[in-house]
Amino acid sequence: MELKQTLKEFTKQGRGLLATNYYNVETLHGVLKAASDLNEPIILQLTKSSIDYMGLETAVNLGRSGLKQFGVTGWIHLDHGGSVELAHRCLDAGFDSVMIDGSELPFEENVAMAQEVVELAKQYKAHVEAELGFVAKLGQSTEGAGFTQPGEAKDFVEQTGVDALAIAIGTAHGFYKSEPKLQLELLKEIAAITPSTLVLHGSSGVPHDQVQKAISLGICKINLATEIKNIFMKTLQERLRSNEEIDLRKVFPVATNAVTELVKTKLLMVKNENHA
Ligand code: 13P
Ligand code: ZN
Ligand code: NA
């Protein structure tokens, strides 16, 4: 099934679709082993930093061949694309989906940039996500984080034709200083009038029951990054402290396995089987 159809279908069923970031072959395979073991679909995301780190062709080819190798249904997505030019390069490289992030721009400029990418993506039959309201980036203060206004969300989707919209309802990228409180009433209002798929960014550190409530109320795509990086590096650091092994093929798998265990819990979370 196409990504758009899958997200529509899952939204109707009150279940989520997990979107995990990957940084190298180890984190990618950790994620894919989890999806394969549980026979669940997954979105594989790349930020500009990960693309710069691996190289565009290598990054997308790793994702594509990984899906095949592990027998997983999945899609490759540009996470937080900052320019039309980057989105274009990713579309050319065969991405299934791109996010154009104009969340820090004035409404009209955000609309104009999203319109441009939607137009472009048509030629590739690709899926487009944008963001309205502001989910604080890593290291940014959450002070200025503006929640998404329902009327604006509706207008934005109507004016741009984006397939998916990331909304700000109380999450932030990275871990939290104190437990986040999702604005579930606001989510309900947004979901009632916004025709696109709704995306939750900043899922690391959000209690699972809150994510599941959000899914039951209309969120579908669940973005997860920091917890993956964290468990991978913490496990690796622990392993290296107590071991002088230099065969990296014997060292990395413990960290890859830790990613698999983490992602399995998240895949079960988004499945949201016990929802009313
Ligand atoms: P976290 O790093 O909080 O999981 O957020 C991930 C994200 O939103 C990627 O776009
Ligand atoms: Zn994000
Ligand atoms: Na987070």
Image (spheres, helix red, strand yellow):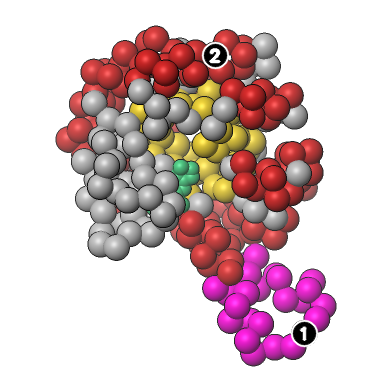
Most extreme residue toward the left, as rendered? 185
- Nearest to viewer (mark 2 / mark 1): 2
User: What is the distance, in whole Å, between disc 2 and disc 1 at their CAs?
Assistant: 51 Å
Closer to the camera in the image, 195 or 265: 195
Residue 130 appears in which quarter of the rendering?
top left
Q: Amino acid at mark 2?
A: Glu
The N terminus - image quarter: top right
Residue type indicated by callout 1: Glu
Q: Main secondary structure of the magenta part?
A: helix
Query: Where residue 138 sits: x, y (%)?
Result: 43, 52
Quarter holding residue 245: bottom right
* Pointer 1 residue: 245
In the rendered image, residue 177, in percent from the top left (x then y), is placed at 29, 63
Secondary structure of the residue carrying tag 2 is helix
What percent of the width, then of the height, locates residue 58?
79, 44
Whether residue 201 is visible, yes or no, is yes
Question: Horizontal placement of 180 versus 70: left or right?
Answer: left
- Mark 2 is surrounded, within 10 Å at the Cα level, by few (under 14), some (14 to 19) or many (20 or more) other residues, namely few
The quarter of the displayed image where residue 251 is located: bottom right
Give, as a single range, the part of the protein colored magenta.
Answer: 234-258
- Which disc number belongs to residue 131? none
Residue placed under numbered mark 2 in the picture? 116
Q: Secondary structure at mark 1?
A: loop
**Is tag 2's residue or tag 1's residue first in the polypeptide sequence?**
2
Question: Is residue 169 inside the magenta stretch?
Answer: no
Asked if the residue at label 2 sits under 8 Å from ligand 2, the reply is no
Using the image, determine if residue 221 lies above or below residue 244: above
Residue occupying the far right of the picture: 247
- Magenta segment includes 242: yes
